[in-house]
Structures are given as structure tokens and as C-alpha cells.
Amino acid sequence: MDNFGEFLTKNPIVIDNGSGTMRAGLAGNDKPKLQFDNYVGRPKYKMVIPTKSQPDQYLGNITDEQRGMLKLQYPINHGCIQNWDDMDLIWKYCYCELQVSQKEHNYFFENYNTPALFIAVQGVLSLFASGKTTGIIIEIGDGVTQIVPVFEGYSLQYAQQRIDLGGRNITEYFNYLLRRSGYYFHTSAEFEIIKKIKEKKCFVSLVNQGDDKNYDTRGIVDTVTLPDGNTMTLTFEKQKAAEILFNPSLIGLEYTSISDLLIRSVQKVDIDLRNTLYQEIIISGGCTKLKDFPNRFLNEVKKIVPKQQKVKAYSPENREDLCWIGGSILSNLASFKNMWITKKDYEEQGERVLLKNSF
């Protein structure tokens, strides 16, 4: 690409760079072509029988057998990139898998000199994908929970809320509960096994059950077969793991609950806007796919607001991909071409152009 005009003839790449999951694809598609755990795997052991060459890193959809031989490291923690080298490897992998030409590939990754860029808050894109211009979005990912209010297309940034709490915390707490029940998982590969079990088996209790002894385990006993053939019995752990979203003190965090977080955001906006926002709550993010989460969250919000206040929440079936879909739709619009931040803009205005032109 020699200029921005040529760039506009290309199909933009949309990346949802989550703490736990990477989603990438081309603008205009209805779902990401790539979706995989956002980590880099490296061999834990030395190869003593040289039957075939062993890669230095494993990326993408790593098989269960490969995972057991690897140390898995996430480059992003609570929404912040901690390891730029590993992040670079994952971005390069995305470009190769999306079959971007080698010329474009090198151009993007040489000192991050992309021809044009646009950065958006996940919640805003989720709202856009929902076909709305007004609403308040609760976005719960692997590492971060965000509350983003938007009114008639305007992002009310002063009222946004964020806490470092998400799906990875639930997995860690689930692992802790399993240890208390006599099941021990130590390695990064075993942590991923726990994560998959959490996604399939855990659910959100419709009410706060309090202490472990108060959990009604009738009808929820579950047996899981582990990769080595052993079995594990789950009871109250399936319910209690996600309770940290509504009571972060269970894991020693002094955050408010996610329902209180939404109320705090609404209370920061003009009083004339609050009624509308309460009736346009959008639930988004992979963590919210846990069974009964939307109902519990709505119930918790209703407990706090005045009785006469109507509260409505929308939880699209594809809400784990909602952010990426919003980016795909937005960047494919003809009217969007004026919103790109070009390399020339950056060279002339510096970092302030990123704050000015992104949302």
C-alpha cells in the first residue's frame, strides 16, 4: 500500500484483542474467521528423541495433547498488554491465517507502521452491533468488566466504569473451590482444562446463596471425565464460582458488585437520560454466556433502583462476538472512511490524534 487511497480499496481487518480470547476477521463478515485462546504456548520439556522439528512457539487452536506439553502464557492481563513480544507473535499469526499478502504483513509489523488505524471501546462496538444508538453496555470479558453509557451515538465517557474482574477470576476461584473439594490442578495447561469445564458446567445462581452450606445441590450434581480418564464430581462449585461478579470480596477484592457498578454509571449521567438508559441495558462479552447470568444481573439491578423505575436488559445470543461484529459493521461502512487515523495524521499530530479520533 503506497497511500491511504489504496488502503481504502482493501478490506479492513477487525481485531477484538481480548484478555482471554482473540477474534479476528475481515470487515463485512458476520462473524470472525479466527477465534482462539489469546496465549502463546512454549515447550516445557527438552526433546530427547529428535523425531521431528519442534516449534519454539505454539499459537492458535492448540490441541489438548499439545497443551499438556506446553507452558501457556497470556500476553494480556486485565486488558493491558504485559508482553509485547508475544502479542506481536499473535498478531502476525492472525495476519498469516487471514492470508494477508506478505507486503502488507511486513508493512504492518515493521515498527507498527500501519497505513490507517481506528481504536474503539468494546462497549460502543457492542451497542453498534445491537442496532442501537442509545444504551448502557455491560461488557464482561476475561480480564475486565466495563460499563459504557452511550446516548444518541455520543459516548458519555465521564460516566464509564471499569474494574479488573472477569472470566479469568472466575476460573481461578473455580479452581480454588475444586481444591477445597480435593481436586488439584497446578500447571497452565491444567488451568485451561478448568476453564473449559467452567464454560460448560458453571452457571449463575438466581439468588445469593451465602455460605457453602446454603447451596441447594439437589439436581445439580455433575460428573466430569478428565483427559486422563479420571472423573470429578461437581456440586456447589458450579454455582458459587461466578458469584464473585456480585460479591468480589469472596476473592479479597474491594470492588463493588457489577450491578452496583452499572448503577454508579447511570447516576453519573444527566438525570433526564437515566430512565432511557435503564431501559436499554445491553449485556455483552463471553463471560455473560454463563447460564442464568442475564436474569440474575437484571434481578440485582432491580433490587437497587426505585420500584417505579422500569429496567430492561437485552442479551443477544451471539454476545460473545458482539464487539467484533460491531467493528466489522462499522469499518465496512462507506461513511467510516473519514474516521480512520492515517499514518500521516499520526506523524503530524502525534499521540493526541489517537485520543481525538477514537472512541
Image (cartoon, rainbow, N blue to C red):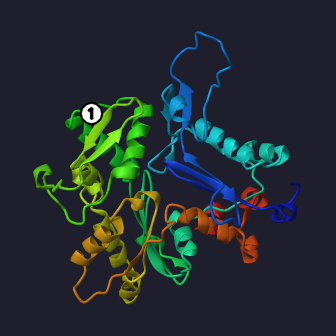
Q: Is residue 114 left or right of residue 74?
A: right
Picture layout, residue 49 above or below residue 220 = above
The residue depicted at 10 percent of the width and 51 percent of the height is 213
Amino acid type, mark 1: Tyr
The count of marks equals: 1
The residue depicted at 56 percent of the width and 27 percent of the height is 42
Q: Residues within 10 Å of mark 1 (few under 14, many from 20)?
A: few
Secondary structure found at label 1: loop
The residue depicted at 75 percent of the width and 48 percent of the height is 108
Q: Report whether residue 203 is seen.
A: yes
Near-viewer residue (51 or 256): 51
Near-viewer residue (231 or 112): 231
Picture layout, residue 212 above or below residue 281 = above
Question: On the rendered image, what quadrant is the N terminus found in?
Answer: bottom right
The residue depicted at 24 percent of the width and 66 percent of the height is 206
Q: Is residue 173 left or right of residue 150?
A: left
Q: Which residue is mark 1?
A: 183
Q: Residue furthest top?
A: 48
Picture quarter containing residue 281?
bottom left
Picture quarter containing residue 290?
bottom left
Residue 58: x and y in percent read 60, 32
